[in-house]
Amino acid sequence: MILIADLGATNARFCITEEGNEYSDVKTYPISKFTNLEELLELYLSDTGKLKGVNKAIIGVAAPILGDDVSFVNVDLEFKISSLKKNLFTKGLRVVNDLALQAYAVFNLHSKDIKYIGERKITDEPKILISPGTGLGLAGIVDNSVVSTEAGHINISDKVLKPDLKKIVDKFIEDNSRVPTYEDFLSGKGISFFYRTLSQNNLKNFTNEEILSNRQDENCIRAIGLQNYLLASYLRYMALVWGAKGGVLLAGSIVNSLIHEEDHDSFRSTFEDSETMKKFMQQIPLALLTIQDIGFAGGMELAKKL
């Protein structure tokens, strides 16, 4: 039995797989409640009655993997890979960035899990996977390899600042004394910040889900439009950097709530809006991945090789 853990900045999600074809024993814990990862892992294994039956694991973490010491970016949690292997997973352990974990699912996608934005279809050429959540993750998929990045921490380009967006950037700088990154805006915290700044009304405490689903409230509509515009612009830059002729893929609940079918034409138009590389951009497939538990799906691909 192999444990698969998808550890984001908000939730820690776990399951068990045996042969990498299906999984069971799914549980979710709020990650902010824990300061010790081994305790969290032992709690899950104890809750499922498998504390002594699991000695291998695939773990995806919302952090860069730079060596033995791993520190999460958006939550106060750190651990040593060597300690996890010694104390819990003596027969095998693979630790990867959480977006890299999700990206492995791309090697075994089904057509029912893909919703295209435009007519171009995914190919075997280089691809990128992007997922806005608590943070903003991006991973590259080149041949049979996955490359994790910290591309969400790039500062927002002045070239995308239409008037409403400049107002939001200025407010962020005023509040935080620094220039915003794409992760600051293309994330859960960014959605609520957009709405509050545009409405100038903190009395309406809409959740992110309510903002994205509300297509009647004027300020929700403006926030959605600006989020779509900024995301499509960001994807254009990332596709050019990666040469992502195989496809730009979007995953997660935020993008699947943000980009409706009626938004596809304008989203695609913004994505392709390059003065010098428009023909190149027109060739790139854009797609939403609707697969549930994409981290588990990626983990199962890795589990087959552990």
Image (cartoon, rainbow, N blue to C red):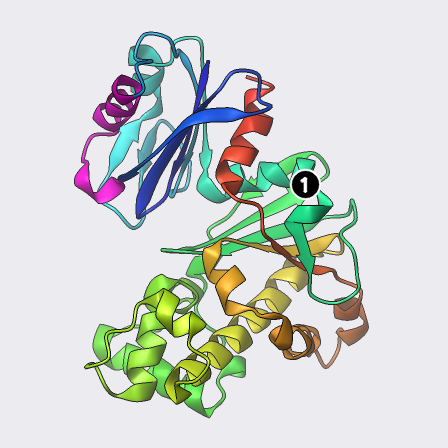
Q: Residue at x 38, y 65 (%)?
A: 209
* 85 w.r.t. 179: above or below: above
Residue 290, percent from left and from top: 58, 51
Q: Amino acid at mark 1?
A: Leu
**What's drawn in magenta, residue-wise?**
30-47
Query: As rendered, which of 176 and 124 lies closer to the eye?
Result: 124
Asked if residue 43 lies in the magenta stretch, the reply is yes
**Residue 285 vs residue 6: left or right?**
right
Residue 142: image quadrant is top right
The residue tagged 1 is: 109
Q: Residues within 10 Å of mark 1 (few under 14, many from 20)?
A: some
Q: Is residue 224 visible?
A: yes
**Residue 302 vs residue 283: left or right?**
left
Q: Residue at x 49, y 41 (%)?
A: 293
Looking at the image, the residue that sits furthest to the bottom is 163
Query: As rendered, which of 249 and 15 lies closer to the eye?
Result: 15
| Numbered circles on residues, count | 1
Q: Residue at x 57, y 46 (%)?
A: 291
Q: State the SS at label 1.
A: loop
Residue 242, percent from left and from top: 66, 55
Residue 202: image quadrant is bottom left
Picture quarter with the C terminus:
top right
Q: Residue at x 54, y 55 (%)?
A: 130
Residue 83, percent from left and from top: 29, 18
**Residue 299 vs residue 55: left or right?**
right
Asked if residue 39 lies in the magenta stretch, the reply is yes
Residue 217, percent from left and from top: 39, 85
* 200 w.r.t. 98: above or below: below
